[in-house]
Amino acid sequence: MRRSINAVLIGTFTLRFSTGLTGALLVYYLAELDAFGAGRDVTAFELGLLAAAFYVAELVLSPIFGVLSDRLGSRPVMQIGPIFGAVAVVMTALTTDLVLLGGTRWLEGAAAAASIPSILGYIALATSHDEGLRGRTVANFEAATLAGIGLGLVAAGGLWELLDRNAFYLNAVLYGVSFLIYRYGVTESRPGTSADTRREV
């Protein structure tokens, strides 16, 4: 179980890295959208709507995916997130239509909504017999989240200069890495036993 917990934390880092990377890449993309064939500049209001779409989707859909995680198990649901994210960033690279870009932001928000509640549910069950382990794991989850988003934001500038909107395709590959981690590095969660706890402390 310890190996699975570590895999979940690594997957959290890579997933949130992709989230931060997309958010920052989108700023550069929208600033040059006219050059990519949009035919006009993006207004500040439209930029705000695109930014809000991600968070609204995460807020609205998280409870739904939380229920699905309870019914289907955390591991299957957390794998949905990277799939949504990869589709979203590929669609972003392929369009300059603001309505479609709003849809990609909603889809990427859905990616976070699918993964984060299921990951937290997984952690809760896997550490259910050791409060100390749970505290350390949740702290590491928060650290992985913040580090992933932060490093994604930092990496975006250099990647945009190097690849321009092709950086979105690279991000799809990174989402694929998260999927592989959840798929093959994580076993279905179960309540920890005392022996599990002693080994993991």
Image: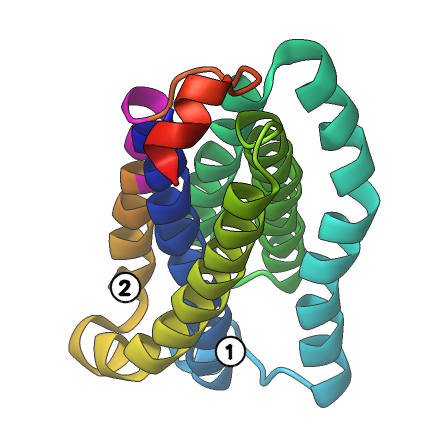
Q: Considering the whole magenta stretch, tell me its main secondary structure.
A: helix
The crowding category of the residue bearing disc 1, from other C-alpha atoms within 10 Å (few below 14, some 14 to 19, many at least 20), is: many
Residue 155 lies in the magenta-colored region: no
Q: Which residue, as the protein is rendered here, is positioned at the far top?
A: 72
Between residue 58 and residue 48, name the one nearer to us: 58
**77 left or right of 143?**
right
Between residue 57 and residue 17, name the one nearer to us: 17
State whether residue 21 is above or below residue 3: below
Q: Of discs 2 and 1, which sits in the foreground? A: 2
State whether residue 123 is above or below residue 90: above
Mark 2 highlights which residue? 167
State whether residue 167 is above or below residue 84: below
Bounds of the magenta segment: 178-185
Mark 1 belongs to which amino acid? Leu
Residue 77: % across, % down: 57, 24
Residue 181 lies in the magenta-colored region: yes
Q: Secondary structure at mark 2?
A: helix
Quadrant of the image for the C terminus? top left
Quadrant of the image for the N terminus? top left
Instruction: Say if residue 10 shows up in the picture.
Output: yes
- Tag shown at residue 30: 1
Query: Which corner quadrant of the image does residue 28 belong to?
Result: bottom left
Instruction: Say if residue 93 shows up in the picture.
Output: no
Taking the spot 46% from the left edge, 57% from the top edge, the residue there is 140
Taking the spot 61% from the left edge, 26% from the top edge, the residue there is 125
